[in-house]
Image: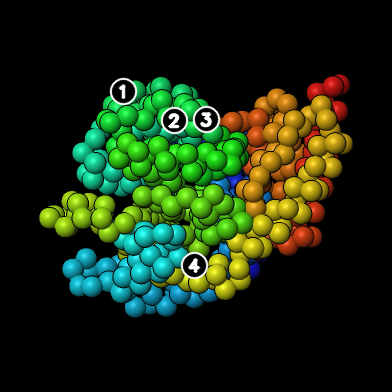
Amino acid sequence: MSLPELPPEEIRRIVEETVRAIQQHHNPGLAALVKFMGFEAVEWSGEGCTITDLAGNEYLDCLGGFGAYALGHRPHKVVAAVREQLDRLPMSSKILFNKPLADLCALLAKITPGDLQYSFICNSGAEAVEGALKLARLHTCRPGVVAALNGFHGKTLGALSASGRDIYRQPCEPLLPGFTHVPFGDADALRKAVNAGTGAVILEPIQGEAGVIIPPQGYLPAAREICDRHGALLILDEVQTGLGRTGTMFACEHSGVVPDIMCLAKALGGGVMPIGAFISTAKIWKVFEANPLLHSSTFGGNPLACAAAIAAIKAIQEHDLPARAAAMGEYALRRLEAVVMAHPKAISEVRGRGLMIGVEFAHEDIAGLVIAGLAQRRVIAAYTLNNPKVIRLEPPLIIDQGELDTAIDALDQATGYAMSLLEG
Ligand code: PLP
């Protein structure tokens, strides 16, 4: 959509007014943080990997809405599907059969691994996690949940109880009882924590907000085996890793592990609609038979969001975005290794799988300055929520090599500049 033709002083006024309204009526701390990071601009439009602000400045989006924009901004096929649904029936009667919902659930059964067959469609990642935890409780009738330290599952009270970082948990305590946290990637610790009272183990196949942490090769198979031995359900939270991000459709495919319950959100909406899902087997889903309204949501499964998700999945398959993410991710990691070599005092490690990449700095102050440097170079990036030393690169999976080069060159320059400031 073309930019409004506004004089510079009018643009300045709108930016100031927007920041003031965020400060006074939404979240003052967030306004300060975003300003500090150097992103004092009002977004106007998006296309592919690019966001344009009100003043016409273009930003390369390497944050991708925390990994949500697999198909980039405003992917045309998803927009067209949503528009077609919008002109007919955006929201469901909630009583007649909802075909987009039915089609999406059937499609999810087809693309998810193993015998995952039934889906509940909700509106966000946290809601998907809430549903998964509730389903595990209903099926096993056990109160215990084992989760991972530094794991991130969302910020509603149940999801927060599973998340593993104290700065978000402590202000809200007491959280739900029965949750234990163990170090991620440590199968022995998991083995010791799971017992006859454990209803579920909830893990991310690759931890996102912890700083893009890939577990050792045998970890997820060990988690599967431990759950099976104790009759606990394995919930894999693929909200961030799912739908191609890590180079396979689902990150659990890297280790061949099939969960009892899978959570999805983010990329499922095709960057156009908010949507989440939890998916499980026919055996586990039986708990909903006696009372089909045991779990429900007014807007969950609405036709607009389901139309977006169907179009998104088809586009991800059609363009083989998992393979593209794998290839582009390998290219980016190779180039980033050279950036690490150029700044050995600043960057301690780069790691990732597919286009889920973390750049770990020696100190969070360096990461903060680099984010501001990226903002000056009009590249959008941010640190991971549970590890401020790590800048995450999670661009749309449609990103091309030239755009990746732009982002990595900017990171290189911003790191050099940050170090020159810190070293005086
Ligand atoms: N689970 C994981 C692995 C996530 O990364 C996130 C969000 O970043 C969530 C759950 C929560 O999703 P939402 O922000 O849509 O509630």
- Mark 1 or mark 4: whose residue is earlier in sequence: 1
Real-space Cα separation, disc 4 to disc 2, in angstroms = 34 Å
Q: Which residue is mark 4?
A: 313
Question: Where the C terminus falls, by quadrant?
Answer: top right
Residue 189, given in percent of the width and then of the height, sits at: 47, 26
Q: Quadrant of residue 192?
A: top left
Q: Neighbour class for label 3 at 10 Å: few (<14), some, many (≥20)?
A: some
Q: Neighbour class for label 2 at 10 Å: few (<14), some, many (≥20)?
A: many
- Mark 1 or mark 3: whose residue is earlier in sequence: 1
Front tag of 1 and 3: 3
- Horizontally, residue 114 falls left or right of residue 408, namely left
Q: Nearer the viewer, residue 311 or 137?
A: 137
Q: Quadrant of residue 304?
A: bottom left
Front tag of 4 and 2: 2
Can you tell which mark lies on residue 190?
2
Amino acid carrying mark 3 in the image: Asp
Can you tell which mark lies on residue 174?
1
Query: Residue at position x 41%, y 22% from top?
Result: 170
Real-space Cα separation, disc 3 to disc 4, in angstroms = 33 Å
Question: Where the N terminus falls, by quadrant?
Answer: bottom right
Real-space Cα separation, disc 1 to disc 2, in angstroms = 23 Å
